[in-house]
Amino acid sequence: MYTGKIVFSQLIDFLPMYEFRKCVNRYRGNYKTKSFSCLDQFLCMAFAQLTYRESLRDIEACLRAMQNKLYHMGIRGKVSRSTLADANENRDWSIYADYAQVLISIAKDLYINDEFGVELDQTVYALDSTTIDLCVSLFPWAKFRNHKSAVKLHTLMDLRGSIPSFIKITDGKVHDVNILDDLIPEPCSFYVMDRGYLDFARLYTIHQCSAFFVIRSKVNLRFCRLYSHPVDKSLGLICDQTIKLVGIVSSKGYPEKLRRIKYFDTENNKKLVFLTNNFILPAYTIALLYKCRWQIELFFKWIKQNLRIKVFYGTSENAVKTQIWIAISVYVLVTIIRKRLNLDLSLYTILQILSVTIFEKVAITQVLNTFYYEKQKPCPYKQLLLFDL
């Protein structure tokens, strides 16, 4: 019989607590705090994400019902709705943003050798954003439309393991292309983007950093074709060209040559045109790289459906960002657990299992390992049958 920790405590064991204390001390998160520390706040919010709590009242009711287990969960302070609301309101969200980056670096090292659909040695990133709608009367700081507020979650995701490497939370009015100014391109890496990020001056900055980009072209692009290269039309390729921009603004922003690839997507019956500064990879590989960009769309869909980032526990900017960053930390924590325990389960399945076993005193490997249930054979009856079947 297992007599160790409850499942939630075993989850917390995967967190680097030394790094968490460093993040708290960096922003003086526990300054003048007597009872409810930053760790208590983080654990309560992580519990809410794992068990799908909808409000502060839900968190308070569930945790108080398990008062005798809070100490074993790592929660030392008294859990109350007002205390948690004040912590989300006043404690710097940067504490949890920095800690999420620590977890992201751990996860990237674990998934560095994973495949993502294209055989490529370089790191491939997908850049995109998603909008989270808010009520304008409750969130007036998140400007978007006249009658609607929203926040944007700008994400740069490593396609190996679907790990978000860079995240910035802004109001809904910030255009996607402005996020390129905040990126520090890694040499020899690929950045795959939709045409909303088409700004040739910013793309030229990526090129000057010895990084590569793959981006969809717009219909009104003005260019001059310099060379045409042979393509295998059976793969859906239409043309592979070396071009130079001739527009007044675009040619000044990107003065060097570009590669233009046209591809016919048979699944959606649509022609796609890509621009890239990489002249080495085959044209079909460039098309496949853009197809892999769809993983970031699945990531946005997954976190909206399985994490609490559409209903918020507070209305201030600090509370919203705190909740989102802790949700990202929980997502990355689940990916770390999945890799370290060598699980074949999906992230959705892992979250569903954890949500109903969070207070159970059972080994986490036993809970999450499906083979434990599949490989068990029914015990033969010792009693003899009375009748022959």
Image (cartoon, rainbow, N blue to C red):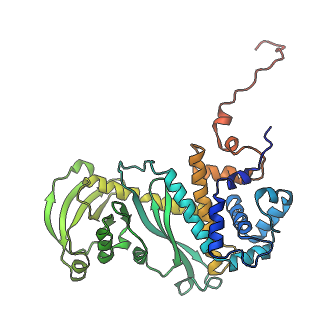
In this view, 3 is above or below 85: above
Q: Give above or below for 3 relative to 280.
A: above
* Residue that extends furthest to the top in the rendered view of this protein: 388
Q: Quadrant of residue 319?
A: bottom right
- Seen at 16% across and 53% down, the residue is 230
Q: Is residue 307 visible?
A: no
Measuring from the top left, give residue 217's x and y in whole percent.
29, 69
Q: Nearer the viewer, residue 170 or 102?
A: 102
44 in relation to 357, above or below: below
Q: Nearer the viewer, residue 363 or 153?
A: 363
Q: Is residue 362 left or right of residue 93?
A: right
243 displayed left or right of 28: left
At 53% from the left and 55% from the top, the residue drawn is 107
Say which residue appears at 25% left-offset and 78% top-offset: 250
> Which residue is painted at 42% across and 50% down in the image?
116
Q: In the rendered picture of this protein, how many numbered marks are placed on residues?
A: 0
Q: Quadrant of the C terminus?
A: top right
